[in-house]
Image: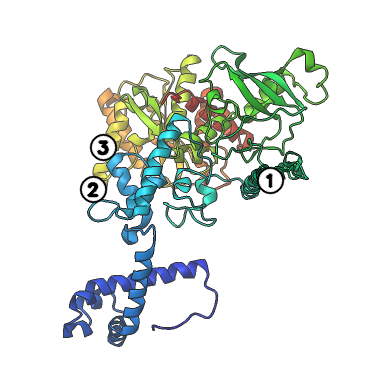
Amino acid sequence: MYGVDLAWEVGASQKSCGEAARNFRYDLYKTFVEEFINEESVWTRPKKVIDNYPNIEEEDWMKFVQYRMSSQFQQLSDRGSEIRTNNEYSSRGGRDGYRKLDQEMFKKTAKWEKRDGLLLEQQIGLDGELKNPACKKASELIVEYNTQESQGTFESVGINDVLSQALSRPEHKGRVRGQSKFVKPSQYFNLSRSSKKDNEVQSMRREIEELKALVRGLCANRDVEPSVDPKNVPTVDQHNSFKASCSAQEKQDGVAEPPSMPVNSQECKLYIFDEVQGGQLLVAFGRVWLESLPTDTVHGIPLGEGNVRVSINVPKLKKSPLPIPTYDATTVEDVVNGFVAWPKILVELDMSMKRRVEGLVTFPTQQQATKNVKKRAMRPLAYYAHSSMRQGNQIEVPIPYTIMGFDMPVFLSFEDIYEFINLQEISANCILVYMRYLEELCRINGQAEKFVFVSPSLISPVRTDTEDAGRRERADNLLSFLRDAPKERLYRVPHNRGRHWVLGVIDPWEDLVLYFDPLREKKRDDFTELMNMALTDWKITTGEGIRRRRDCKTKISNRPCPLQEGSVECGYFILGFMRDIVLNGIDALESKQFYTSEDLDLIKREWSGHVMEFINYDV
């Protein structure tokens, strides 16, 4: 059972099983053996072991205790303790790891801690102090670097962040310090596929600059000229310009130099689209690289079609958002004297040079410009989420009483935005935001009295003592909306029946509920009972029960609708159903057989644009 050496390569799943087995044996030892090590009863299986783990035989238990008390195990334990003692940054958080620590700190502070804070928290001893000198020094540097970063005098980019520079150690290629073992560098730092090559190029560039400085120093000491001018030595960028990052060369102190002006660059004006007043808004003056290719990179990210590389020299509106933000820059003032990608349709060249460069940069028509901007409509929100929301910041969207029954804000997290943009399972908060958008659309079109949206949270299952009591509470919530319903008003009620969204459209005066299920299943769970309970109460309170039989059940009709082919698109389909009913009516919705990817992209663009209205850039 013990002391068996594995002679084959262990897979990832087998490693997890082995770790679980080690933890299990550790818990057994701590609970049932360690305290009774000098007693005879330790050799007999405890009653809890017999009750909870009947598969452990008496013979196996004796072998387990014998091995734990042997000198061989004690030597292994002492060796592990010695290794742990000599570890410069030894974790003191126990076996729960960073994941549980992160959750505990979030409960205390209501915000997600950065990984440098989590790492230091794991080093704190029982007395609440950092005893290791290396940890104390790293803690001081982290505080200093965070202060400099907030003041804009410290650059923290990708894997070369505050923690890596404070520890003076490069990040491990397969894991992330201060995070759980399941977090990969590509996920945490949002590294592109070419980031590894870019990092290698940056490292080689620094080595070349150091060699140049060394050659100059040797020549200066010996009063001789170098046989090869270091300035003419080709850099890594000249050999690999199609892969290298276009960020400026670094000084010895780590601060980026202003970019040099190549021959194929030209002074320009930089604009953004003004969605409030319409047209274009001048935000900065700079230079444009005329021979920019879609494969060229800015900060490790390809430019893409329709974009050019620019540098901002003089900002005009410092707080204006960038049309293509980066992970660490969202406004114009963030990239002064630095590179950034910019849509070529928003770049105006010096008129005296326009004819000479006409063959290098083409200016699309206004129709083409609008089309290109629509394709990139979700990009600003995605970059804002990556740059400003990954540490726990949220976007507050007020939901009016007409949807919730009372005024209440919802808070969109980074996960909400990431999942919505990437066509994954979406939360009720995402649906509420789009319902708010559709309600404004109804108000503009004069349909506010005809269509009413009901929050899905009002009829979601609640935890009560009995199932009937929970359904009673949900029916009362729905009744509060239906109580003063005028004739011909329709109530749209999204409902989640267990990781699947459906839509109910209620016409109380016709005692009718239209049921739209993108999977076209007949199963309704408790939706039928909920509707019957709410509408029966409505008939009683409005007097409709006198005209009709009170025990007459509400008619719930399964209606044809676009069919969902995937497994996670149901939330988007429900948003599409509500949108089609507002714009084209129920008959137009029932005539559709499916939604195309363009239909779903339209919903995502409208949702993203509506969310962008509530971003506070001053926070």
Q: Nearer the viewer, residue 34 or 549?
A: 34
* Mark with earlier residue (1, 2): 1
Q: Mark 2 highlights which residue?
A: 466
At x 48%, y 48%, the residue is 164
Q: Residues within 10 Å of mark 3 (few under 14, many from 20)?
A: some
Which amino acid type corresponds to the residue marked 1 in the rendered image?
Arg
What's under tag 3, amino acid-wise?
Glu
Which mark is in front, 1 or 2?
Answer: 1
> Distance of mark 1 from mark 2, alpha carbons?
91 Å
Please name the amino acid that badge 2 sits on: Thr
Image point 23% across, 71% down: which residue?
Answer: 31
Rendering coords of residue 474 (x, y %): 30, 37
* Residue drawn at point x = 34 percent, y = 37 percent: 459
* Left or right: residue 281 compared with residue 459: right
Mark 3 or mark 1, earlier in chain: 1
Residue marked by disc 1: 222
* Residue occupied by mark 3: 473
